Structures are given as C-alpha cells and as structure tokens.
Image: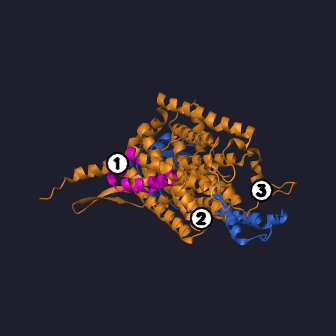
Chain colours: A blue, B orange
C-alpha cells in the first residue's frame, strides 16, 4: 500500500478555510484525514467539521468521585485509626466532614480535569510534528493526508480557494 | 438644533475606547506582547535588585534569625498569640481572590472587558497564595515540623484532627493553590506556544518556552480539550474560592470569643477578600500599563472604568457586611463584646478603625461614582492602594487588637509587633519580585483570548445609532 502524503495548506481567514474543507470532502478526502490547526479556538461549527470527542468531562467526574472517596476516608475512617478522644465531642461528626468532603471532591475534580487535558492532547509531546509558526500569528492551517497521486489536484484546488501556501508537510521540532 | 456628530467620528471614538473594537493583526499583537517582555530599562533592574536585597534581608535573613532565636523575637505574646503573621496570611489570601473573581466569574458571565487582564489577575492569585503560605509557616515557629499538618501514617500515632478549622485551612488553601496554579497554566499554554514560535533557536528562552508549551500546536482536538477544561475550571473554582476565605474566617468564628463568634464572618471575609483583591488588580494594571511597552493598547481606561464599578459595588457590599456584623454584636449587649467594640473605636488603635472605614468606604465612594475619575489610572491606583491599606487595618483589628480584650482583664495588653514587621515587608517585596520576574518570562496578555474577543465584537447600525454587538463564538 502506498504511503499517504501530508499536505499543509495555510489560510489567512476562517471563510476560505471552511470553503476548502467542504471542497476537500467533495474531492473524496475523509474528515479523519484532515486536521485544522489554528492560533485561536475555531469551533467545529464555523468550519463545518464534525464534533471533536473529549474525555475531559468524564475524567473530571471520575476525579470528583475519587476525591469524594478520599474525603470519606479522611473524615470517617482515619479518626478510628488514630483515635483522639476529646471530651463531649462526637468521634466522626458530620458537619465538619462536609467541609473535608467538599474540598477533596473539588481537588479531585480539578486535578483530573488538568490531567485530562494532558492525556487527551498527548501532552507533553516533543517529537517532530507538522506545523508552521505562522499559525500562532493568526493563520489557519489544514493538515491533509492524501494518496500521493491526489496531492497535485488537491494543491491546485486549495490554491484556487485562497490558500496562501500549500506545501508538503515536514515534521519538525517545535 | 441638536448637534449630531458624523457616524464615522462616533465609530472612531468607539474603536479608540474599546480594545475589542480596535483589532490588530494577530502577528502584530504577538510582536507587541513579546516586545513588552523583552524591553527592560535600567530602572527595572534597579528595582529588581533592590527588591531582591530586601527579600534576602527581610524575608530569608530575618526568618532565619527567628528560626534560630525562637518565636520570642516576634511580638506575639499573651493575650495576642496571633499577630501580624496571621494578619498577613488573611491579607494575602484575600489578595489571591481577585484572580479567580476576574478570571472565573467574569468568564462564566461572559464579561468581555476581562479578556486582556485575566492573566495579570491569575498571577496575583498564585503569587498571593505563596506569600500566605510563607506567613502561616512563619507563624508556626518550628517550621521544620510543618509536615505534621499532613496526614502521614507514623508510629507515634499522630494524625491531623479533620474536625479542626486549622485542618480545613490546610485542605482549602492547598486545594486553592493547586487549582489556581493549574487554572493559570492551562490558558497560558497557547501563549507559551506563541512565545516558542517567536523565540530564536539556541537560546535558553527557547528551551523554556518549548518545554512549557508541551508541544501545543492548536489542533482542533487540543482546543476542544482546553476549552472543556477551562469551562470546568471556571465553574468549579468559584465555590473553591468562596470556601477558602470562608474557612479562613472560621478559624476565628468557630471560637467563642467576643468579636469573633459571628455567623456572618464567612461572607464578610469573602467580600473583604474581593475588596482588597480588586484593589490590588487595579494597582497592578496601572503599573503594567504605565511601565511596560505597548501595554497602553491592551489596557485602556475602559478597563479601569469597568473594574472601578465593580470596586464600588464591592465597597458597598463590604460596608453592608461590616455594619451587619457590628450591629448584631453591639445589640447583643454582652459586656465583653461591648468592651471590645469600644476598644476598637476609642482605644489606642482607634485611628486604625477610623482609617479602615475611610479607606474602605469613604474614599472609594467619593471617587468611584465618577466615570471620569474611575477611568483615570493614577487615581484609581491610589484608591486601590488605600483600599488595601484599609483592608490590612481591618485584619489587624480582627486579629491582634480583638485578642487584646478578653474575659480576663488582668491579661489585657496591647500587641507590640517585633520581627514580624520585617517579615511582612519581605513577603510584600517577594510578591512584587515574583510579579516582575513573571512579567519578563510569560506573556502577561492572553493574546489568543484578546483576538477571540475581537472576532466576536462588531459595530452595527440601528437607525442612526452605531452600537456594539457581541456574537457568541463558543
């Protein structure tokens, strides 16, 4: 099987980039073979792209549950393991435990949200990648994987649609 | 005949006033932010050097002296066992509230004016909490035993009592420090990637930005994960913020002492924290705008105007809570509480009580009602400074002065601070020093958020009137 070729098309604005994505679909490029890279968060709806999947909210929920359980352990189990008898006071009172449960739940949720970004985005990633620095200057790039024979046709179409440059993407250290 | 200005002139005026209506190419904005980081005058290094010396002397040397000599060199003694260390802890935690307030609450409510200065505020949260941590470690005295606070299994069967407000403090402050640092870092990643792309190869800065940018490119997936995470953080960090200062207030309110045992202390402390925090944000913004290159484009009078309005509302809320706390205690008629309230106003530190009301209420109300005055950077800087002085006074009145009067008159003694004054100055110097260092290392302006905001704003004509419209891009 022939190896796929990677093209990187750079656009100055969202509109031509959205038009280019539509045209690429007509040319038979599947959505999975395209990736949009931009310097600001451009929504899928603006570009007519399928919704992106993210595990971050699920991980946040998982972290919250884990944090809650740690809170339960600290507030209700550990006082029995390390007993401190204070006259007239209940051993595992509920109102102060609510505070411990709240803080641990929030901590678990926020740490797992943070870690979720790393896991989902595969951060940190210092391998060579397809990228051009102009993207952080406000350009929008479309990274296209296509069979080598289609590369010229796609390049011509994208240039016609207003691409500032279309070139073979080279993986480089960022 | 009515004097109608031409539309173009009105539009120009709107663009001049509002950053969101005055877009520049992204590359140009990036360049301006990078230039502001790299342009440092000798004055910067002079101040940096002086502050470093002050931190070395006032914070580390003096702390070392206290560790060697013991807490006796500090002024804390019967009956005021809690002195300036605790005043500063509460003060710095209060300062830290502004970052979350501006960044999270204004993000949730989509207040667009927040965009250029969210990071400047978030940095205050992290750096403020570091100073709060230092202050509480100083208060411990035997700081090398601070790990006893942590729940670590040990053969001596020592375990923190999770029913104690001091343990809640540990949990709340740790949660807030960690979450606010993560909340600072996440939206910083795209700007670190921008800095990486604009830094020449072979420099230490390139390595620094490359490592911290984590390989971020701005793919659809990366933005989706980041946006989701920021939304979760914005909503979740707000109750954490409220919990932190509420729990700090419970360190006092849970004690059945005159002046402290109050059900309203939680919200009173939270509003006080926002009061000092907003005052500090406005000071930082005025300094950044006045001293850093290109910042006049990003931070405009409209931002001071908007924050000024918030400060006025917060000042009114603080006055409401203060009076509420005061009148309930006064009306109760408890002998010792009345004695304490009289001591606050008419005791030897009464000037501080009146100074607190003047700085926290009278001055903000006198100045911030006026749009022109609150839009003037130097004037609102002074208001912010005075609010912080007033809020520091408030904490001083609550902590050592309130401890002076108790139910055992033979122990009454006025608190005389010792080495803790130097240590307090050290934390202030360290806060400014960290901020100065950060201003040269990380982009203080979240450029991608500014550009996103500029894309969402446009001018539209309704009849003869040109109005600003904002689209929902997310």
Please tell me how crowded label 3 is: few (under 14), some (14-19), or many (20+) other residues with Cα within 10 Å.
some
Identify the chain of the residue marked 1, using the numbered disc in the image.
B
Q: Is residue B429 magenta?
A: no
Q: Are marks 3 and 2 on the same chain?
A: yes
Q: How would you rate the neighbour count of disc 1 (Cα within 10 Å): few for under 14, some for 14-19, many for 20 or more?
A: some
Which residue reaches farthest front?
A: B410
Alpha carbons under labels 3 and 2: distance apart: 37 Å
The secondary element bearing badge 2 is classed as helix
Q: Which residue is mark 1?
A: B22
User: Residue B268 sits in which quadrant?
Assistant: bottom right
Most extreme residue toward the top, as rendered?
Answer: B42
Subunit ID for the residue under disc 3 = B
Query: Can the viewer see residue A38 in this picture?
Result: no
Q: Give yes or no for residue B378 being in the magenta stretch.
A: yes
Query: Which residue is more in the foreground, B73 or A81?
Result: B73
**Percent of width and height locating residue B414:** 62, 50
Which residue is more in the foreground, A111 or A150?
A111
Q: What residue would you read off at disc 2?
A: B337
Q: Earlier in the sequence, mark 3 or mark 1?
A: 1
The residue singled out by tag 3 in the image is B151
Give the CA distance from mark 1 to mark 2. 57 Å
Counting other residues with Cα less than 10 Å from the Cα at mark 2, is it few (<14), some (14-19), or many (20 or more)? many
Element type at mark 3: loop
The mark nearer the N terminus, 3 or 2, is 3
Look at discs 1 and 2 and give the one toward the viewer. 2
Quarter of the picture holding the C terminus of chain A? top right
| Range of residues picked out in magenta | B351-380
Q: Chain of mark 2?
A: B
């Amino acid at each position: 099987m022939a190896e796929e070729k990677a093209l990187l098309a750079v656009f100055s604005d969202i509109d031509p980039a959205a038009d280019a994505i539509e045209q690429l679909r007509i040319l038979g490029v599947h959505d999975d073979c395209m990736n949009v890279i931009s310097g600001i968060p451009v929504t899928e709806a603006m570009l007519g792209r399928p919704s992106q999947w993210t595990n971050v909210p699920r991980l946040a929920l998982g972290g919250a549950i884990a944090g809650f359980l740690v809170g339960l352990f600290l507030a209700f189990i550990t006082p029995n393991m390390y007993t401190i008898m204070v006259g007239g006071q209940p051993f595992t009172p509920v109102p102060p435990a609510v505070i411990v449960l709240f803080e641990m739940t929030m901590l678990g949720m926020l740490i797992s949200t943070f870690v979720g970004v790393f896991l989902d985005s595969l951060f940190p990633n210092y391998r060579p990648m397809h990228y051009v620095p102009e993207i952080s200057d406000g350009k929008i790039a479309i990274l296209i994987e296509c069979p080598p024979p289609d590369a010229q046709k796609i390049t011509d179409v994208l240039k016609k649609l207003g691409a500032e440059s279309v070139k073979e993407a080279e993986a480089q250290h960022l | 005949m009515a004097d109608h200005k031409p539309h173009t002139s009105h539009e120009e005026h709107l663009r001049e006033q509002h950053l969101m209506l005055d877009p520049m190419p992204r590359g140009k904005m990036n360049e301006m932010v990078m230039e502001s980081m790299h342009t440092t005058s000798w004055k910067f290094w002079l101040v940096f050097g002086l502050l470093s010396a002050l931190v070395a002397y006032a914070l580390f040397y003096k702390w070392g002296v206290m560790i060697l000599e013991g807490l006796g060199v500090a002024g804390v003694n019967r009956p005021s066992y809690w002195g300036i260390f605790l005043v500063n802890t509460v003060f710095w935690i209060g300062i830290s509230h502004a970052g979350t307030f501006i960044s999270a609450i204004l993000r949730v409510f989509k207040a667009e004016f927040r965009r250029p200065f969210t990071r400047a505020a978030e940095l205050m949260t992290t750096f403020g909490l570091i100073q709060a941590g230092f202050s509480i470690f100083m208060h411990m005295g035997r700081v090398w035993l601070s790990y006893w606070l942590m729940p670590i299994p040990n053969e001596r069967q020592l375990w923190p009592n999770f029913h104690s407000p001091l343990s809640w403090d540990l949990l709340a402050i740790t949660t807030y420090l960690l979450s606010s640092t993560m909340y600072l870092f996440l939206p910083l990643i795209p700007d670190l990637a921008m800095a990486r792309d604009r830094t020449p190869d072979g420099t230490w800065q390139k390595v620094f930005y490359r490592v911290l940018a984590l390989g971020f490119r701005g793919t659809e997936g990366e933005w989706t994960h980041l946006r989701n995470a920021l939304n979760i953080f914005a909503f979740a960090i707000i109750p954490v913020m409220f919990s932190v200062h509420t729990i700090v207030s419970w360190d006092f309110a849970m004690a059945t002492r005159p002046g402290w045992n109050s059900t309203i202390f939680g919200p009173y402390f939270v509003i006080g924290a926002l009061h000092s925090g907003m005052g500090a944000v406005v000071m930082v913004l005025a300094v950044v705008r006045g001293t850093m290159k290109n910042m006049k484009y990003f931070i405009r009078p409209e931002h001071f105007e908007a924050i000024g309005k918030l400060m006025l509302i917060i000042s009114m809320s603080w006055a409401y809570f203060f009076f509420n706390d005061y009148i309930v205690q006064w009306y109760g008629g408890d002998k010792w509480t009345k004695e304490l309230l009289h001591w606050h106003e008419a005791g030897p530190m009464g000037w501080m009580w009146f100074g607190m009301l003047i700085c926290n209420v009278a001055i903000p109300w006198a100045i911030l009602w006026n749009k022109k005055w609150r839009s003037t950077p130097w004037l609102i800087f002074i208001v912010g400074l005075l609010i912080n002085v007033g809020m520091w006074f408030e904490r001083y009145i609550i902590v050592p002065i309130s401890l002076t009067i108790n139910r055992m008159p033979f122990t009454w003694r006025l608190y005389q601070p010792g080495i803790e004054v130097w240590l307090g100055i050290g934390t202030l110097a360290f806060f400014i020093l960290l901020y100065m260092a950060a201003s040269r290392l990380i982009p203080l302006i979240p450029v991608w958020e500014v550009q996103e905001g500029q894309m969402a704003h446009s001018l539209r004509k309704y009849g003869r009137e040109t109005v600003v419209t904002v689209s929902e891009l997310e």
